[in-house]
Amino acid sequence: MRILVVGAGGIGGYFGGRLQEDGHDVTFLVRKKRRAQLEKTGLVIESYHGDAHLIPTLLVSWEEAEPFDIVMLSTKAYHLAQAIEDIKPYISENTYIWPLLNGFQHLDVLKEAFGAEKVLGGLCFIETTLNAEGHIIQTSPSHNALFGALHDDQVHIVREMSSAFTSTKASFLYKENILQEIWHKYLFITVLSGVTTLMRAPVGPILEVKGGDALTRQLFQEVEGVMKAIDAPLADEIIDTQMKTMKSMTYEMKSSMLRDMEKGYATEVEHLQGYLLTIAKEKNQHTPLLEAVYHNVKTYELMNRLG
């Protein structure tokens, strides 16, 4: 199985690196600057689960290569359009796209580009960052990459992936209910990014301050209401479950969106909160707190001339 990983940052570099470490045929599609860095240092993973130093096979967009069996997409949502163009030369009728992006909207975009039967369900749970040397730093127990079939014609490939990925140092997990898993993560990441960016604070202080628990639950309820309005497959009592998860996080845990704002980077607010607000308007859902989250981040982007 030939695997193309789009990007070699904190997510693609980590999961692709763990697959390469396990002996899989992995190629990384990277920008020229990242290729020069990786050619100099190698792909370095410093992890809670054990370090790795690998010599990666690298491609820059539109360099010649045979089509791949699996394309793992781990880009930010605002890079998706460019990523689609970049991978087109490496796609055949036998290629499957495995996206690890947050949210849901990207699935429709990918299906439009490559066909519904070629886009797998996927998501991941991991905390990573790149240090100044370009090393991937992974510091917590969670390092799960999930996949599953969204189309009947995909059952064979996800079963093949499940069998092939069992011995890696990362957790590659086949989920029959992958669509529900995607919506559950979307709910959680929307609220986590929402409260942390609105308060410019980690999870711990937000939940500790008087009223913080109730505010967080209100945002969960608003987002759940929007998702239920389009019959998203959410489990019963999902808010209680996810509140418990949030309370179990470390005191200093920040969302990736907050970390991006602290660095002056662009955000995925349109892909996450913006997409849901469009649905809310169509379905006449009342979402004042979600709107406050969205306008807070959009104001940040305007002030920083982003987007």
Image (cartoon, rainbow, N blue to C red):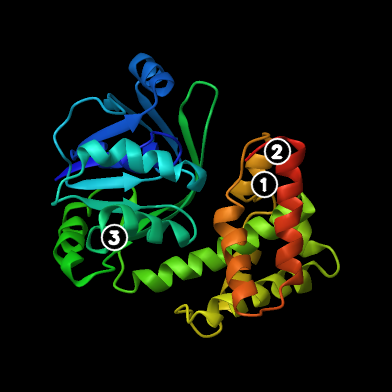
User: Measured from the top left, where is residue 201 in percent x and y?
Assistant: 75, 50
Question: What quarter of the picture does the C terminus occupy?
Answer: top right
* Whether residue 14 is visible: no
State the residue in front, 30 or 79: 79
Contact between marks 2 and 1 (CB within 8 A): the answer is yes
Mark 3–mark 2 distance (CA, rounded to whole Å): 33 Å
- The local secondary structure at tag 1 comes to helix
Residue linked to disc 3: 120
Residue linked to disc 1: 258
> Between tags 1 and 3, which lies in front?
3
Mark 1–mark 3 distance (CA, rounded to whole Å): 28 Å
Circle on res. 262: 2
State the residue in front, 146 or 229: 229
State the residue in front, 20 or 107: 107
- The local secondary structure at tag 3 comes to loop
Q: Disc 1 marks which amino acid? A: Leu
Query: Could you classify mark 3 by the number of other residues whose Cα lies within 10 Å: few (under 14), some (14-19), or many (20 or more)?
Result: many
* Whether residue 280 is visible: yes
Q: Return the disc, 3 or 2, that comes first in the chain's sequence.
A: 3
